Amino acid sequence: MLTDINSLTGDELKSFENFIHSPYFNRYRTIKKLFQYIKSFHPNVTPKDVYEKNISARCTEK
């Protein structure tokens, strides 16, 4: 999955972001936060970046 995310071009990432933020396809704020967190590392997302504790702390904060 990380390889797929890292291989997205800028335009592809923007299209994916639009999909994630679409109220029709996604109503969950935590998914939006997760995407923003992962996006901040693009195009060099590593397993350490998506370690469960890192994501949990970042995506559950208010």
Image (tube, rainbow, N blue to C red):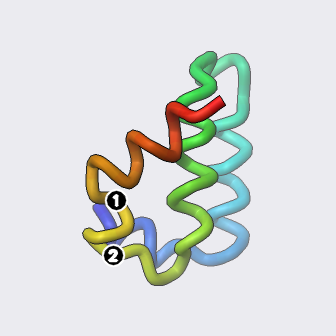
Name the element at disc 1: loop
Give the side of residue 16 with respect to residue 54, left or right.
right
Q: Name the quadrant containing residue 42.
A: bottom right
Residue 46 in the figure: left or right of residue 24: left
- 51 vs 10, left or right, is left
**Closest to the observer, 22 or 42:** 42
The amino acid marked with disc number 2 is Thr
**Image spot of residue 34 (x, y percent):** 52, 44
Q: Residue furthest bottom?
A: 44
- Kind of residue at badge 1: Val
Q: Position of residue 29 (x, y in %)?
A: 62, 25
**Snapshot quadrant of residue 11:** bottom right
Cα–Cα span, label 2 and label 1: 7 Å
Image point 58% across, 20% down: which residue? 28
Classed neighbour count for the residue bearing mark 2: other residues with Cα under 10 Å, few (<14), some (14–19), many (≥20) = some
Position above or below: 3 against 59: below
User: According to the image, label 1 marks what residue?
Assistant: 50
Q: Are marks 2 and 1 in contact (CB under 8 Å)?
A: yes
* Quadrant that contains the N terminus: bottom left
Q: Which residue is mark 2?
A: 46
